Amino acid sequence: MTTTRAFIGRQPVLNRNQQLIGYELLFRSSLQAEDAGQLAVLQADTQVLVNTLHNMGTSWLVGNKLAFINVGEAMLASEFLELLPARRIILDLAPDIAPSNELIARIKYLHAQGFGIAMDGFSFDAPSANLLEYAKYVKLDVQAHNSHHFQMLAAQVRSYPVIRIAERVETHEHFHLCRELGMDGFQGYYFAKPQTLSAKVIHPSFAHTLELLNLLRLDAEIKEVESVFKRDIALSYKLLRYVNSAAAGLNTTISSFNHAVTVLGYKRLYRWLTLLLVTANEDGRTPPALQKTAITRARFMELLGTALDLPHDVCESLFVVGMFSLLDVLFDMPMTMVLEHIHLSEQLNQVLLDQEDKLTPFLQLAKACEDKEMRQVPQLCRELGLSPEQLNQAHVAALAWVEELGL
């Protein structure tokens, strides 16, 4: 069966320094799909996968990163795989793939074309273990084994010339275990769906940024806004660099804060500051994946609002909610404490605290699309009145926009 409908999800794949090396791309066959299909969906319709990637443009869907794609035997045999940009694609082989002469020949051919091979949920007891010699990446499921068995498996795989990626890393303990074992990469909700661990005081540079956001929201005088920039060298430098960049779309050089604020306007300046807020962690320890997750949520939610023909100010609110949805993690403090510093509207506070509001389902949907199983996506789409095409278009456009920012 051929269909043009597909849901897209992605989960970051990080190296040992928590830098993005790629994304695992996740697809659904219909709005009614309640989960990932456990390979049955992947077997059912290779054309959905390939047409989606090919037509949407893999290069800008994942930027300059790799795309990890789950494959079963049917998909491996599909001639449509050759339509994909091979050197950007890593084929995740399912654990239950049994090597046959035909399958081995096909894998050798795909490898020669430039495709990378990854062993998903790897175990030496799995049928796919006989394909290990063709793999570049091996994914080890930290939750599929007890701690001792996982350590033994990681040590055994280390003797092979492969990149070891720990998957389903969901807790602080999982991460530290894998890091202690010298794993080469990580993947899991610990990065894409982080949890607040403790609280700390906001650093002064964040305080300046928050002060500016509050001034803009209250429509303060330009002189008041300008005075904040004058008190912060880093902020003033970034402002002038931004306003004079090609991204600002201006044909003149601006050298004063007053002129910069006037030209940008309060709405555009507010947008820039919210972006700066989640990308300027001064201790350097914020994983890039968290930054991109927040920014992608913001753009995705804004585009969903546009797709539903919501008023411009509502779409702007959706952007702010998405951008601020990870501030509790970035600041390492409860969201309630973060909101005390920002002074947002009561409506936005309710959404960020996951309380009932008409905008809350948008944030819930953005989070659901980061879930590998995407179980809540169909129901939330129905609740918002979104079609699969609208969801796909907004998601892909958001991913492309974030990559174009060069973060």
Image (tube, rainbow, N blue to C red):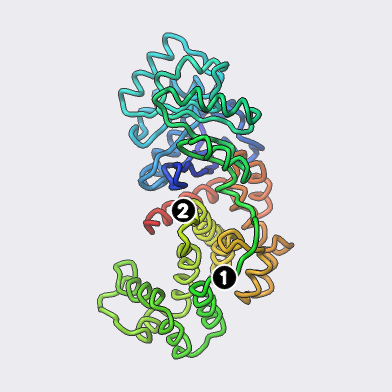
Contact check, label 1 and label 2, Cβ < 8 Å: no
Residue 360: quarter of image: bottom right
Relative to 58, residue 342 above or below: below
Taking 260 as reference, is 369 left or right? Answer: right
Between 344 and 397, the one nearer to me in the picture: 344
Relative to 203, residue 147 above or below: above
Residue at 33% x, 85% y is 256
Q: How many neighbours does mark 1 have within 10 angstroms: few (below 14), some (14-19), or many (20 or more)?
A: some
Relative to 221, residue 43 above or below: above
- Count of numbered circles in the view: 2
Q: Position of residue 295 (x, y in %)?
A: 49, 59
Q: Amino acid at mark 2?
A: Pro
Residue at label 1?
Answer: 202
Residue 288: numbered disc: 2
In primary-sequence order, the first of circles 1 and 2 is 1
Residue 355: quarter of image: bottom right
Residue 14: tell me if it is visible: yes
Residue at 51% x, 40% y is 186
For the C terminus, the image quarter is: bottom left
Q: Amino acid at mark 1?
A: Ile
Q: Residue furthest right?
A: 356
SS category of the residue bearing label 1: loop
Q: Position of residue 191 (x, y in %)?
A: 55, 48
